[in-house]
Image (cartoon, coloured by chain):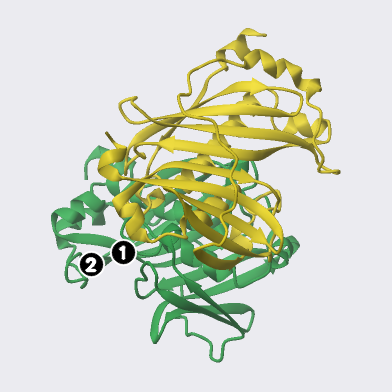
Chain colours: A yellow, B green
C-alpha cells in the first residue's frame, strides 16, 4: 500500500448546515444525511482509485444495497459537522463501509453502516471485484459501535398506505429513483409532530429493486413492536424495505 | 461604507457538482439551483449585516417574493461552478438581488433575478427597512443582461393537473413549504423526455401565499404561446404562479 493510500484509510468531509438545508426541526434531515453518506462514500472510493470510473473500466458499477444509521442528535442550524468514512470489510462481491458523524465540538452524534455491491452494468448480475483486491489493504478496524442491520420482513397487513408516482425530480444520474428519495417517502408516512417530539434514532433500509420515472408505487407501513416497518412496492415487486425507530427527544440525547 | 462592505458588494460561492447531486441529465437540477440561489443570498445578507439575525432584532424577516432564472447551460457532473450575487436595488420595503452563474472555465452560464420583501414576523405585513438603510451603499450596477420578470396570469382552463399533499420532507425551517420544492412540483408536470431534449432556458416564479404541512394543493398548467404557465392553488388561494420555457438543447447553447 502506498503512503497516499495509508493516509486515506479514514476519509473526512466537513459540512456546514445552512438555513436553506434545514428541515422543520432546524436540523439536518435524515434523507439529506443519507445523501451525504453516499456523497462521502463516492469521494473516498474515488480517492482510493476504486470509484465509479475504475469500475466502469471493467464494465461494473457500485450499487448501494443497505444503509443503517444510528443517531442520537442531528446537526443543527449553522452547525459545522463532519462525516468520516472507512472500509470495514471487503470481499469479491461487496464492501462494507462505515461512517461516523461528529458535531461542532468534535463530539460523536451517530454512526452509519452501508453495504455496497458491484454489478455488471449490462447483465445487472453481481460482478467480480478481484481486479481491485488492493482495496482490502485499506480495511481498518476503526470502531463502529452500532449493531449490524438485520433482515427486514414487510409487515402484513399494512396500517398506513400511500400511493406515489415517481416524477422528474425523483430521478438521479443513473436514471433510477434517487436512494435518498425513498428515505423521504418512508418518513413521509408519519406526521410532522412525530419528528417534533421524537428523534429518528435508528433507520435501516435495504434496496432490493430499482424504480424508474413514471413507476407507480405503494408505500406500506405497520408498527412491529417499537419499529415502523415500511415496504415500497411496485405491483408484486418489493423495491425496498425499511425499519424506522423514533425516540422521544429528551431520551435520545441521554 | 467600510472597506469590508465595499469588498462584499459582489459575493461569490464556489460549488462542485457531485454525482449524488445530479439530476437524470447529469446536470445541476433547476430546483437545486434555486436552493443555492437562496443559500448564497442568505450568506451575502449575513456578510453585509442585513441577514436573518439583524432583521429578527426588529421583529422582521426576509421573504422571497420572486425568482427568474435564465440559463443556456447547466453545470455538469463533477464541474466546478460559481454563483455570484449583488444588490441591484433597494428601498424601504424590498430588495432586488441578482446572480451570475459561471462554469468551470469562468464562462457565464446564466443569470437570475430575485425580489425579497421584509415582513413583520407577527403581523405578516410589509416591514419598514429604513433601519438598515446602509445596505443602499452596497447597491451596484454590475451587469445582469436578462429581462425583469413580468406579471404571470394563471391560464384557464388548465391542460395538465396533478394533486399533491405536502409531507414532512417538503417543509423548511420556517415551517412552510420549501421554496425550491414548488419548483420541483412545477417541473414535475412534464415528462423526463422533455428535459432530455430541452434545456430549461427561462423560469419565473412568484410566491403569493405560504403553504404548510398537510395542505392539499392542485398544480395546474397550460401552454400560453411557448411558455408553460403553472399555478399551485389551495382551494381559491393561489400559492404561487410560474412560467417555464424549454428550448431544444442544441439551440439553447448557440
**Callout 2: SS:** strand
Residue tagged by mark 1?
B63
Mark 1, other Cα within 10 Å: few <14 / some 14–19 / many ≥20: some
Side of B20 where B253 appears, left or right: right
Indicate the quadrant containing the N terminus of chain A: top left, top right, bottom left or bottom right.
top right
Within 10 angstroms of label 2, few (less than 14), some, or many (20 or more) residues?
A: many
Residue drawn where x is 44% and y is 42% of the image: B13
Q: Position of residue B140 (x, y in %)?
A: 35, 54
Give the image location of residue B163, x and y in percent. 52, 77
Does residue B83 sit above or below A143 in this rendering?
below
Residue B189, placed above or below residue A133: below
Q: Can residue B79 be spotted in the picture?
A: no
Q: Are marks 1 and 2 in contact (CB under 8 Å)?
A: yes
Q: Quadrant of residue A118?
A: top right
- Left or right placement of residue B177 versus residue A209 in this view: left
* Residue at x 57% of width, y 15% of height: A140
Residue at the extreme bottom of the image, as rendered: B157
Q: Residue B119 carries which label?
A: 2
Q: Residue at 35%, 75% (x, y): give it.
A: B209
Q: Nearer the viewer, residue B154 or A123?
A: A123
**Distance Cα–Cα, label 1 vs label 2:** 7 Å
B244 left or right of B26 in image: left
Name the spot of residue B155 as percent of width and height, x first. Answer: 53, 87
Q: Residue A72 carries which label?
A: none
Residue B243 visible in the snapshot: yes
In the figure, is residue A176 to the left or right of A110? Answer: right
**Foreground residue among A146 and A212:** A146
Q: What element carries label 1?
A: strand
Amino acid at each position: 500500500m502506498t503512503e497516499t493510500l495509508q493516509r486515506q484509510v479514514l476519509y473526512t468531509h466537513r459540512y456546514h448546515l445552512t438555513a436553506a438545508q434545514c428541515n422543520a426541526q432546524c436540523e439536518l434531515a435524515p434523507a439529506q444525511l443519507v445523501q451525504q453518506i453516499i456523497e462521502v462514500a463516492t469521494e473516498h472510493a474515488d480517492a482510493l482509485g476504486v470509484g465509479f470510473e475504475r469500475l466502469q473500466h471493467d464494465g461494473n458499477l457500485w450499487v448501494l444495497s443497505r444503509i443503517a444509521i444510528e443517531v442520537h442528535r442531528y446537526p443543527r442550524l449553522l452547525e459545522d459537522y463532519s462525516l468520516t468514512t472507512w472500509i470495514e470489510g471487503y470481499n469479491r462481491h461487496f464492501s462494507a463501509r462505515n461512517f461516523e458523524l461528529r458535531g461542532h465540538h468534535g463530539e460523536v452524534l451517530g454512526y452509519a453502516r452501508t453495504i455496497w455491491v458491484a454489478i455488471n452494468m449490462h447483465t445487472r448480475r453481481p460482478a467480480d471485484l478481484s481486479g481491485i483486491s488492493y482495496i482490502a489493504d485499506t480495511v481498518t478496524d476503526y470502531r463502529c459501535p452500532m449493531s449490524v442491520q438485520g433482515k427486514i420482513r414487510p409487515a402484513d397487513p399494512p396500517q398506513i398506505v400511500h400511493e406515489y408516482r415517481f416524477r422528474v425530480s425523483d430521478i438521479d444520474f443513473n436514471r433510477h429513483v434517487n436512494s435518498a428519495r425513498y428515505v423521504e417517502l418512508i418518513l413521509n408516512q408519519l406526521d410532522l409532530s412525530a419528528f417534533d417530539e421524537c428523534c429518528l434514532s435508528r433507520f435501516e433500509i435495504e434496496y432490493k429493486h430499482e424504480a424508474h420515472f413514471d413507476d407507480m408505487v405503494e408505500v406500506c407501513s405497520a408498527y412491529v413492536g417499537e419499529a415502523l416497518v415500511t415496504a415500497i412496492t411496485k405491483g408484486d415487486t418489493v423495491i425496498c424495505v425499511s425499519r424506522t425507530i423514533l425516540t422521544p427527544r429528551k431520551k435520545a440525547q441521554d
